[in-house]
Amino acid sequence: MKTMRTSRLIVTMLCPLLAVVPAQAGSGDAKGPSLAGAWLGTVQLSPTTSVRIAFDIQAKPDGSLSGTFLSLDQNGPPAALSRIGLVRGWVTMEVSSAGIRFEGMLNAEGSAITGHLTQKGVSLELVMKRVPALRPQEPARPYPYLEEEVAYQNTRDAVTLAGTLTLPPAGGPFPAVLLITGSGQEDRNETVYGHRPFLVLADYLTRRGLAVLRVDDRGVGGSTGDFSQASSEDFARDVLAGVGYLAGRKEIDPQRIGLIGHSEGGIIAPLAAVDANDVAFVVLMAGPGVPGDLIIEGQIAGLLKAQGASQAAIDATLGAQRRLVEVVKTETDPNMAREKLRNLGYTEAQIQTATSAWFRFFVTHDPQETLRQVKCPVLALNGTLDTQVSARVNLPAIEQGLREGGNTHFVVKELPGLNHLFQMAQTGNIDEYAQIEETIAPLALETIAQWIEAQTKQK
């Protein structure tokens, strides 16, 4: 009973709600091995049932830590860690919203943590092992281009944004792209499961003659601001601040600045493009074309089906999700929404997430409405094995929105065999992300580079 209860609790936390409200970062020992990096382990729920667990930890310039928790075999979204502690080798990690706590001892080499994962009073042995940091596609210094640490202001929201600008070594002014991360607290490299996709993408494009700006999200790394209170609209203003910064650089052609948005970044990029006349092009990498409530329903159905759930169980879970979303959509008073959700039996963790600014915008925003207003050239890509943002559902919706708005300068394309991170995959499930050595498939890199070169070619 206890093992089944633990499994059910983890699913309940991860499955019904896509958004996770970020919390306070932790800190590490001043000396000794760092916790920064990707960690993988397996919880044995019963003699025949196990669940793989992942922690993804990032270090900020001041030495503090932030990160996420993920149950790989349940195919849900990451949950932000509310606490990360490392004191004399003793590690503590918590997801307070779900009552999850991991404690253990870090070995002298910094390669493994031996301890226990506890949730709602149930404690299970867990050994977390570090994933090798360097992936084959990651570039090594010295780079054949210029690299500069930069910071600029979103003055409207009083947010300082910090990032890395890479520039070709000579010539200019250059065309430029600003990279926009997906959902959750992301650093400038979009670090996930031991991969740094935006580092690889920026390196590839800069070697092809493009300037590339990649930026820490609000409240992450060197950037200030409260991530937990922000929605995609707020992030779009951060993007506009970045466009303005690029336009003011003498090395960059202000008429050839574009955006590349991955996942939720594919919602944010069109929002920014509509509000800025100086965005020359947009690339959507696994960007949603339908409202977020439909995205979540697709994730839930796929997850439960993969776990062998009956259609009746899937329908029941989707029904509960739809009741939650209906409250969020119809009740504009957050306090009243919380009370209604409590009366319907949702947990406080679910209620906290469902009434956040991010979640409310995500489930009520229709990407097609924004896409109808985008007039610049657009490239929309998605992998055929994407299990988080389905190519079959979202690419046609993106194309429809652009066509209805009169945009004739777009390409919508499925890339065979690629997952949500644009890796060459076998199933597309989240549990493959860390296991695949490839960070971004060459097919995706070349498709993006060639299309951008065609848009920015000087005539």
Image: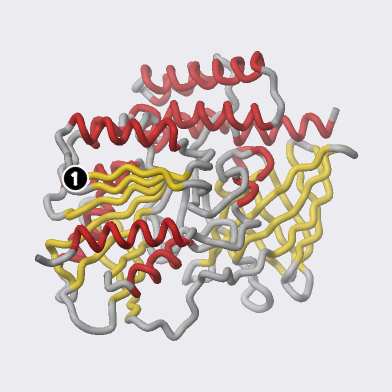
Q: Position of residue 274 (x, y in %)?
A: 18, 43
What residue is shown with label 1? Answer: 409
Colour scheme: secondary structure
| Side of 3 relative to 425 (left or right) | right
Q: Position of residue 123 (x, y in %)?
A: 82, 43
Taking the spot 41% from the left edge, 64% from the top edge, the residue there is 201
Q: Is residue 130 above or below residue 42?
A: below
Viewer-proximal residue among 2 and 299: 299
Taking the spot 35% from the left edge, 75% from the top edge, the residue there is 207
| Side of 65 relative to 285 (left or right) | right
Q: Is residue 285 above or below residue 4?
A: below
Q: Position of residue 92 (x, y in %)?
A: 70, 57
Viewer-proximal residue among 396 and 166: 396
Residue 302 occupies quadrant: top right
Residue type indicated by callout 1: His
| Side of 303 relative to 218 (left or right) | right
Taking the spot 66% from the left edge, 52% from the top edge, the residue there is 54
Q: Position of residue 453 (x, y in %)?
A: 24, 63
